[in-house]
Image (cartoon, grey):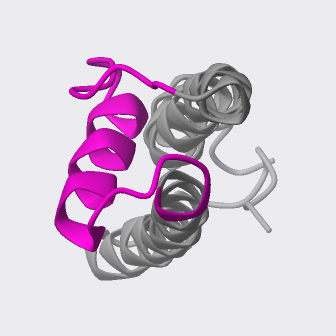
Amino acid sequence: MYEHRTQPPLSRLAFAARLLRHAAVVGGMVCISLGIGMLGYMHYERLAWRDAFLNSAMLLGGMGPVDAPKTDAGKIFAGLYALYAGLVFLIAAGILLAPVIHRIMHRLHWQRGT
């Protein structure tokens, strides 16, 4: 997936393409997670899709829900979704930072002519 330390670093264009691929993966992951959250809030809390979107987006962004859950099932869903959203946030950050960190490390350790 990434070039070996004995290979030269990617060109800027190839690196930009790699960043775009990683961003596309994160975008897909966030869209799926947003959909899961919206469905859960719509089902368990009977929220309109706009309110379900807002609550899900706020949790995925690390801010917290806007509407406090009122039903027991909604409270359990909101708690589990909050834990899930925290993991998605960390995983997304890792996926987005991985190519940048790799490029920095690669430039520091690349041995020319080896």
Residue 79's place in the image compared with 96, above or below, is: above
> Any magenta on residue 58?
yes
Please give left or right for residue 108 compared with residue 80 in the image: left
Image coordinates for residue 47, horizontal then vertical, percent: 34, 56
Total marks shown come to 0
Image coordinates for residue 94, horizontal then vertical, percent: 58, 34
The answer to which image quadrant residue 43 occupies is bottom right
Which residue does the image show at 40% across and 65% down from the upper left? 19
> Any magenta on residue 73?
no
Query: Which quadrant holds the N terminus?
Result: bottom right
Image coordinates for residue 35, horizontal then vertical, percent: 51, 70
Please give left or right for residue 27 compared with residue 87 in the image: left
Q: Nearer the viewer, residue 93 or 107?
A: 93
Image coordinates for residue 20, horizontal then vertical, percent: 37, 75
Which residue does the image show at 57% across and 23% down from the upper left? 86
Please give left or right for residue 53 compared with residue 80 in the image: left
Please give left or right for residue 63 compared with residue 96 in the image: left
Q: Nearer the viewer, residue 22 or 89?
A: 89
Residue 38's place in the image compared with 58, above or below, is: below
Q: Nearer the viewer, residue 14 or 64?
A: 64
Residue 114's place in the image compared with 26, above or below, is: above
Q: Which residues are magenta?
A: 42-70
Q: Nearer the viewer, residue 16 or 36?
A: 36
Which residue does the image show at 70% across and 51% down from the upper left? 113
Looking at this rendering, what residue extends furthest in the front direction? Answer: 71
